[in-house]
Amino acid sequence: KTTGWIHREHLKHQGVKMLAAVNYTKIDQQGLHISVRKRERILAVDHVVICSGQEPVLPCNHQQLDELSIPVSYIGGALKAEKLDLQRAIGE
């Protein structure tokens, strides 16, 4: 049994909207470009958190993200998947 549902409920009560079946296209000055069930959308965002598991995954290169006026945080294997463990990911 996990506590994931508790975290999701907390986020939901904070106004966070959860989306499923999402493909992330790009991040630019307009916001986060996504496709949900083949329907294109642009989400206005004030902060982007890139969280990936054992494989480093970035929607674009670091320099492009650094040039945005939107703060970007990296968690887990997003930058460095080597020796990724739960303790390191939580600390990030």
Image: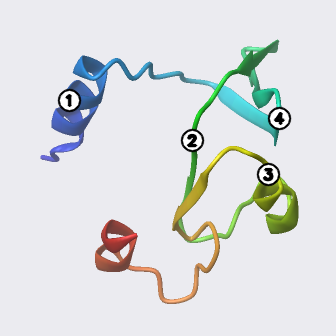
Please report whichever mark, 3 or 4, sits nearer to the chain's N-terminal start: 4
Residue in the picture at 79% in, 48% down: 68
Q: On the image, numbered disc 1 is attached to which residue?
A: 10
Mark 1 neighbour class, 10 Å CA radius: few under 14, some 14 to 19, many 20 or more: few
Reading the chain from its start, which is encountered first: label 4 or label 1? 1
The residue type indicated by label 4 comes to Gln
The amino acid type found where label 3 is placed reads: Pro
Label 3 and label 2: CA atoms lie apart by 15 Å
Q: Assess whether mark 1 and mark 4 are in contact (beta carbons under 8 angstroms).
A: no
Which comes before the other along the chain, label 3 or label 2? 2
N-term-proximal mark, 3 vs 1: 1
Q: Are marks 3 and 2 in contact (CB under 8 Å)?
A: no
Q: Outermost residue toward the top?
A: 39
* Mark 3 secondary-structure assignment: loop
Label 3 – label 1 distance at C-alpha: 27 Å
Q: Considering the image in quadrants, where does the C terminus appear?
A: bottom left
| Residue 47, label in figure | 2
Q: Residues within 10 Å of mark 4 (few under 14, many from 20)?
A: few
Horizontal side of residue 47 vs 9, given as left or right: right
Nearer the observer, disc 4 or disc 1?
4
Along the polypeptide, which appears first: circle 1 or circle 2? 1
Q: Secondary structure at mark 1?
A: helix
Closest to the camera, between mark 3 and mark 4, is 4
Look at mark 4 in the image and give the residue it sits on. Answer: 29
Q: Are marks 1 and 2 in contact (CB under 8 Å)?
A: no
Q: Secondary structure at mark 2?
A: loop
Query: Residue 32's spot in the image, x, y percent?
Result: 73, 31
Q: Earlier in the sequence, mark 4 or mark 2?
A: 4
Q: Is residue 31 left or right of residue 81?
A: right
Residue type highlighted by circle 1: His
Q: Which residue is mark 3?
A: 59
Q: Residues within 10 Å of mark 3 (few under 14, many from 20)?
A: few
